[in-house]
Amino acid sequence: MSRLIVLSNRVADRSKKASAGGLAVALKAALADSGGVWVGWSGQFADVSDPHVAEETHEGVTYSTFDLSRTDYEDYYNGFANRSLWPLFHYRVDLTTYDRRYYAGYQRVNSYFARAVAPLLTDDDIVWVHDFHLMLVGEELRRMGKQQAMGYFLHIPWPPSEILLTLPNHQALVRGLFAYDVIGFQTQSDLRSFTDYVLFEAGGEVHDDGSMSAFGRRILARVYPIGIDAKEFEDLTRSREARRIHHRMHTALGERWQIIGVDRLDYSKGLLERFGAVEKLFDAYPENKGRVSLLQIAPLSRSDVPEYIEMRHELEAAAGRINGRLAEYDWNPIRYTNRLYTRTALAGLYRASRVGLVTPFRDGMNLVAKEYIVAQPSEDPGVLVLSRFAGAAEDMDAALIVNPYDSADVVDALQKALHMSFEERRNRHQSLLGRLFRYDVHDWRNRFVETLEAVRTQRRDVPA
Ligand code: GDG
C-alpha cells in the first residue's frame, strides 16, 4: 500500500475544538482510516519566500503546515478563492469579483503549496488535492517533474459553461485540472457541466471508458458523492452529552415542534429566503403560531469578505423584523445564533427537531442533510426538507424535495412535514438511512483512493 498525501487549504484543528465546514469534517474521517500526511496552511502569517513546513503527528496522521503572508492571504484566499471562485461556482455571477491581482495571488500560493509538498514526496506516494483553492497545484508539481498518481476532488459544484466563461482565467484552470490523473465531482450534474466544457470549449474528447482527453493529457473524471461517518455520528447521538442536550431542548420546547437549520453563514445557503419562508408559514397556516419555531445555527465564516458582512446584517435585520412582527411574550418564531456548537450538541439538537430544513440555492453536497437523518430516532423520526439544488438531493429523494426559489413550495413542504403520519415519516427515514450507512465517508475515500492506486500501479508497471 502506498502513503496517502492529502492537500487542502487548511488542515483540521488537532485540538478538540469544533470547526464548522464540511471539508475538514470529511477529511479527518478519511485520513483516520489509513493515516497519511495532511498538508495545508497553518492559519498563521509570516513573510517568507519559501515555505517552511512544520510537522506534527497526531493519531497516525502527520500534519504538515506552513504560514502564508498577509498579501497572499488577501489575494489568494479572501480574493480569488472566496470572491471569485466561490460565488461563481455557486452560480452567483452577480456577487463575483474579478481582479488580476487575485489571480496572480492564486497562482503564487498554488505554486507555494507545490513547493511545500514536493520535498515530502516519495515515488510510491499518492497525492489527493482538495477543493477550489488548489486547482493548480497538480500542474505545478508536474512542472517540477513529479510523476506520482495525483487526484483532485471538488467539494463545490462545477458550474455550466455559460457561467464559467465569465471568469477570465477559465481555460488556465481547466488546463490545470488536466495535470491530475483522476478528478472527482459530487454529482452527475457537475460532471455533465465539466464534460460539456471539455467537449465544446476545450475541444477535447470523451472516450468509451469514461476517460477524457484535452490539453495533451488523458484523465479520468468521475462522480464520487461524499458521505458522512454515519456510524460515528450515530454513536455521538447516543452519547450521554447528546442525550442531555436533547433532553434539555425537549423540556424547553414542551409541546412545541422545532424546525432546525445548521449552516455556515454563507449566501449560498439561502438563509434569508429560509427566514422568509418560515414567516410565510405562519401567515399561510396560522395554527402553527405559538406551536412551531425555527432554530437557526449559523456560525460565522469568511468574516473578512464584504459580501459576508452584508449578508450578516441582512439576516440580523430579517430575524429581528420577523420576531418583532410575530413573537408573543412566551414564543419566538425564530431563534437565530452565530454560536459554534460542538458536534455532540448538534447531534442532540438535530434529534430534538421535528423538521430539518436545508434550503441552499446551490451546494456541492450538504452534509447537514445527512447528519440530520442519522440523528433521528427510528421510533419517532423527523422529516428532512431538502433543496433540489443541494448535491445531496441527487440520492436523497425520500426527503421532501423543494425549490428554494419558490417560497410557497417550501411553506407547503414544511406544513406537510409537520403533519406527516408516523408511517410515512418512518418509511422515508428508513429509506434514507440505509444509503447513508452504505455510502459513508469511508466508502467515498476508498473509491477515490482505489482509483488512484490503480493509476499508480499501472504507471509503475509501464515505465515512461
Ligand atoms: C463544503 C461544500 C459539501 C455547521 N455548524 C456547526 C458545525 N457545522 C458543520 C456541520 C457539517 C459542516 O459543518 C458543514 O458541511 P456542509 O456540507 O453542510 O457545508 P460546507 O461547509 O459548505 O462544505 C458542501 C462539503 O464541503 C463536503 O464536501 O457537502 O456542499 O460547500 O458537518 O455539522 N459544526 C460544529 N458546530 C457548528 O455550529 N461543530
Image (spheres, rainbow, N blue to C red):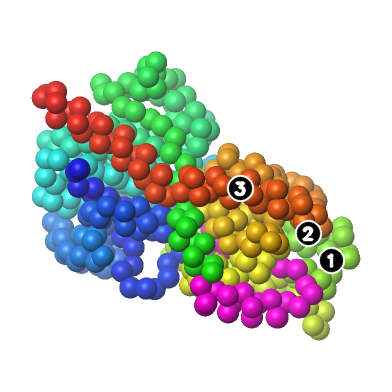
Q: Closer to us: mark 2 or mark 3? A: 3
Residue 88 visible to the viewer: no
Residue 82 visible to the viewer: yes
Residue highlighted by disc 1: 288
Residue 290 in magenta stretch: no
Specify whether 268 is left or right of 256: left
Q: Relative to 108, is 271 above or below?
A: below
User: Element at badge 2?
Assistant: helix
What residue is at 10 percent from the left and 50 percent from the top? Answer: 119
**Residue furthest front as drawn:** 379
Identify which amino acid the numbered label 2 is placed on: Leu
Ligand 1 within 8 Å of disc 2? The answer is: no
Q: Relative to 325, is 225 above or below?
A: above
Picture quarter with the C terminus? top left
Magenta-colored span? 239-267
Residue highlighted by disc 2: 418
Residue 154 percent across, percent down from the top left: 40, 43
Residue highlighted by disc 3: 432
The mark nearer the N terminus, 1 or 2, is 1
Disc 3 versus disc 1: distance between alpha carbons? 27 Å
What residue is at 19 percent from the left and 66 percent from the top? Answer: 56
